[in-house]
Image (spheres, grey):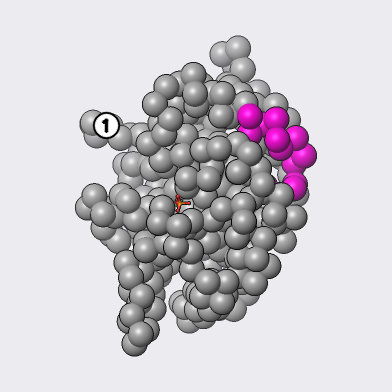
Amino acid sequence: MRSHAEVGRGGHPCRNSGTLTESAHATIFHMKKTIPLIVGNWKCNPVTELHAVALAVAVVKAHQKAETPYVAIAPTALHSAAVAKKLTSSPITLAAQNVSSFAVGAHTGEQSAAQLKDGGVELVIIGHSERRAAGETDVEVSAKVQATLAGKLIPIVCIGEKKRDTNGNFFTEVETQIRSFATELAPAQLKKVVIAYEPIWAIGTGETATNDDVKEMQLFIESILTKIHDRPTAQSVRLLYGGSVKPHNAAELHRVGGMGGFLVGGASLKAADFSAICKAVI
Ligand code: 13P
């Protein structure tokens, strides 16, 4: 059987006139790791549904082909349904910015993996540094990864150091974040996870990690995953880089950095910039 992270394409179920149907949508569950994945994290933007839909339509227009690269967008939970409607016959995948660690029940303000899946979501960003800064812990992140996998969605787990120090202590910070969720997963589960390395000092600052820093971190993350499980497992995990990725730096970051794509914040709010980043990795 093919793994989530490997070959093939399929349809994802999405709502259409009230019935569950298979759309022509390319599913993320069968991504080829050799094809980059670019995810736009819209964070708490834009203000209106009208703008969210317009942005989604512009992204769809720019990405008609299924594999050049894989593209996903993560609108706010409120705008997700309206955006989903614009993606149904496109190859763009719908992502969420958060998920509950609970499956169902009395959890005010939460959205479960099953609810996200019902709404057409396939990828879930977990443990973004902006959520960790608001109090989300490694333990909660790990629980959300479990809930996401149980709900048959793909987690994008965000990790990254607050700042860099000359002694390399930031590697320990990153290793702790990885171990907290990866040691709780069997190899077959870990292979379905995407890890996004997003150094906090590079997010929204215009200060990108150097291409070599990204490459070094790619090798470091793989070495930690190898220690936790084994080399084939480590190498089948898709890694992304995030932090001030822009049209002007995307090509070199991708070529030298060795990651499997990008998690893009600010530049994903302008369809032209997002599209330029997507083109830069081909
Ligand atoms: P920027 O691209 O705005 O630096 O944001 C990165 C990010 O946090 C994506 O999740």
Q: Is residue 15 left or right of residue 181?
A: right
Q: Quadrant of residue 90?
A: top right
At x 66% / y 47%, what residue is drawn? 276
At x 34% / y 55%, what residue is drawn? 129
Residue that numbered label 1 is attached to: 109
At x 49% / y 23%, what residue is drawn? 51
- Magenta stretch: give its range: 58-70
- From this viewpoint, is residue 242 visible? yes
Task: Decide which of 124, 262 is in the foreground and name it.
Answer: 262
User: Which element carries disc 1, helix, strand or loop?
Assistant: loop
Q: Is residue 275 left or right of residue 191?
A: right
Task: Decide which of 235, 255 is in the foreground and name it.
Answer: 255
User: Is residue 238 depicted above or below 119 in this figure?
Assistant: below
* Residue 60 lies within the magenta run: yes
Label 1 CA crowd tier, 10 Å (few <14, some 14–19, many 20+)? few
* Residue 211 lies within the magenta run: no
- From this viewpoint, is residue 6 visible? no
Residue 24 percent location from the top left of the image: 73, 30
